[in-house]
């Protein structure tokens, strides 16, 4: 899955390395086995080329959940990112 760094500055960088160890911060039973090596969290080094990287789906979901990347290269105002924000709608069940 393609993911994108936020901001125009990130898109101008020819190369950017992000290091993450999802198993060190996520605590659930559904973690992929390759996030561990002999029971210890594995560190992944992700290379972004001009703010864009192709990563496996499980890593992409982690990065999106943590707010480290965006799903789109478009720069959108917050009202587009949070559905109903300007209308005062709550889509989280509240």
Image: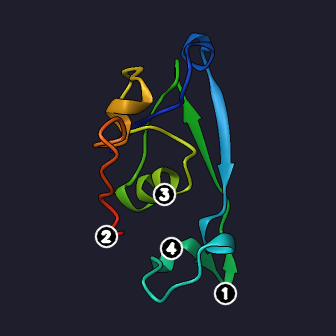
State the CA–CA distance, disc 2 to disc 4: 34 Å
Per the rendering, the mark at residue 93 is 2
Q: What crowding class fits label 1: few (fewer than 14 Cα within 10 Å), some (14-19), or many (20 or more)? A: few
Say if 39 sits above or below 19 in the image.
below
State the CA–CA distance, disc 1 to disc 2: 37 Å
The residue at 37%/42% (across/down) is 82
- Left or right: 82, with 41 as reference point: left
Q: Earlier in the sequence, mark 1 or mark 2?
A: 1
Q: Quadrant of the C terminus?
A: bottom left
Q: Earlier in the sequence, mark 1 or mark 4?
A: 4
In the rendered image, which residue does mark 4 sit on? Answer: 34
The residue at 54%/48% (across/down) is 67
Q: Nearer the viewer, residue 23 or 42?
A: 23
- Left or right: 69, with 86 as reference point: right
Per the rendering, the mark at residue 83 is none
State the CA–CA distance, disc 1 to disc 4: 10 Å
State the CA–CA distance, disc 3 to disc 1: 23 Å
Q: Earlier in the sequence, mark 3 or mark 1?
A: 1
Q: Earlier in the sequence, mark 2 or mark 4?
A: 4
In the rendered image, which residue does mark 1 sit on? Answer: 39
The residue at 59%/74% (across/down) is 26
Q: Secondary structure at mark 2?
A: loop
Q: Nearer the viewer, residue 45 or 23?
A: 23
Q: Return the residue found at the far top.
A: 12
Q: Position of residue 23 (x, y in %)?
A: 61, 73
Q: Nearer the viewer, residue 15 or 38?
A: 15
State the CA–CA distance, disc 3 to disc 4: 19 Å
- Are dots 3 and 4 in contact, CB under 8 Å? no
In the rendered image, which residue does mark 3 sit on? Answer: 65
Q: Position of residue 81 (x, y in %)?
A: 37, 36
């Amino acid at each position: 899955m393609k993911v994108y760094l936020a901001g125009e500055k990130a898109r101008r960088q020819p190369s950017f390395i992000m290091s993450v160890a999802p198993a060190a911060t996520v605590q659930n039973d559904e973690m992929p086995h390759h996030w561990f090596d002999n029971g210890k969290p594995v560190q992944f080094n992700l290379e972004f080329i001009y703010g864009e990287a192709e990563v496996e789906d499980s890593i992409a979901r982690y990065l999106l959940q943590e707010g480290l990347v965006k799903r789109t290269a478009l720069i959108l105002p917050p009202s587009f990112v949070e559905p109903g924000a300007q209308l005062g709608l709550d889509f989280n069940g509240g």
